[in-house]
Amino acid sequence: MLFVFNFITLPFLGEVTLSGSILIVFFLCLLAVVGFEFVNGFHDTANAVATVIYTKALKPVYAIPWSGFFNFMGVFLGGVAVAMSILKLLPIDNMMALPVGVGACFVLAVLLSSIIWNLGTWYLGIPCSSSHTLYGALIGASLAFTWFYGGVGVNWDKAKEIGLSLILSPLFGFGAAALLMWLLKDVIKAKALLHIPTGENDKPPFLVRCLLILTCTLVSFFHGSNDGQKGVGLLMLILIAFLPAKFAVNHAISNDKILLSLNQTEQVMSRVKSDQKIGQAEIFTLDSAITKTKLQVAAPEKTYKFRKQIKTDIKDITTVLGDKQIKLADADRATLTTASKGLNGLTDFAPIWVIATISISLGLGTMIGWKRIVVTIGEKIGNQHLNYAQGASSEIIAASTIGISTAFGLPVSTTHVLSSGIAGSMVASGGSGNLNSGTLKSIAMAWILTLPVAMIFGVIFFTLFHLFI
């Protein structure tokens, strides 16, 4: 298939060289990732505002833009550790070596699968994890990619790590919220927090209201810092798939800085080799990798190969640092750690305009379409109206869980953690009979189906798109 190459210049991309048809697909992918994050805003962030609205701490007209703003700030200030976990799950190196159309098929398959399932569960008012949807679609599309092109497919070690994070976090949310609610109810006996608001004018006391607004703010911020980063990761996936020469590595880091990290590593290895015989295989492997990388820095032929070599260096440095048989002086250990971080910045990065785009999309999405999920969270998980303590305890636990997970670069589901927290607080208030079994069955069914359905969608869409490239 022949294409006529187009040259366009955009302020945030520089000069882009893509064929006519691929250029259209590129912009469709950009639009799709913005759409995914927009849907994520009103699908997931509704969880954060449900408690302040149903405890009457804030009216929706104030709660929604407030949450939207702090989601924006969360993405902007949250770093890129969670974003990079997406790229580490995928066969990104194999993808960059293939025609751009293959990457386009992959990206569109993932985004369409995620958007369709998220919109479907939102329409039905079922709290469902956008994280589960996204990772299911990523795994499905990766499996289809491997089927057609072979090579290394899904990074199953990373998939297990992500899976454990997504499974354990709601269990922790349920138990921790139940415990906190029990302390408030039976130990501290904070009667002001146990009040169930009735009527339009029954608003919480000033300090209780401040607490509820604070917890809503924290959940919104940490949702942005965790879920919002997934959008950053997807946008980086698009840029790397279509424009690997520009975005596979961080060109803002100079060759001098790269060579400094490589030379420092080489010097440490030279000292260690002469001091001990144990661990020689690991030392030789790292030494060899550093030599190859230095040659590519001097004359990089293909950016994606350079990215792959840098990742090999980081992996080998980590192996040496973790090998207890290799005796390293404190200064040498510190040097290797610093060098590893410096090299890691070459692959784990996102331009400021990428973060800003996702921040704005998530913030705006929060302000639209929130009501369906809020009604389920606020009215249908339990058989009674939320009291102040239930709202506060579930959001304190959710914010803490999401914040800690973000610090470790682990993706979690805001929907799962907060919904489980509310359920736990309801059980602590009045036993399992205090839960709405019908709603819980619907949520549980959505949770069970999300991963396999998203995987199937990912496989189907990639296969269909693959037929047309």
Image (cartoon, rainbow, N blue to C red):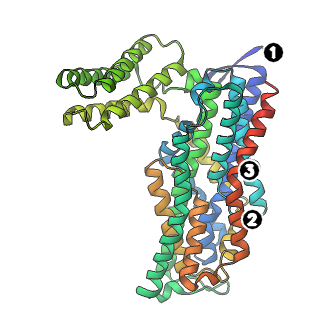
Q: Is residue 70 visible?
A: no
Element class at badge 2: loop
- Per the image, the residue denoted by label 3 is 453
Within-10-Å neighbours for mark 2: few <14, some 14–19, many 20+: many
The first of marks 1 and 3 along the sequence is 1
Identity of the amino acid at label 2? Gly
Q: Quick one: quadrant of the N terminus? A: top right
Identity of the amino acid at label 1? Met
- Per the image, the residue denoted by label 1 is 1
Q: Distance between the residues labelled 2 and 1?
A: 45 Å
The first of marks 2 and 1 along the sequence is 1
Question: Where residue 351 sits: x, y (%)?
Answer: 53, 34
The first of marks 2 and 3 along the sequence is 2
Identity of the amino acid at label 3? Val
Question: Where residue 158 sits: x, y (%)?
Answer: 52, 42
**Residue nearer the viewer, 104 or 24:** 104
* Residue 183, placed above or below residue 366: below
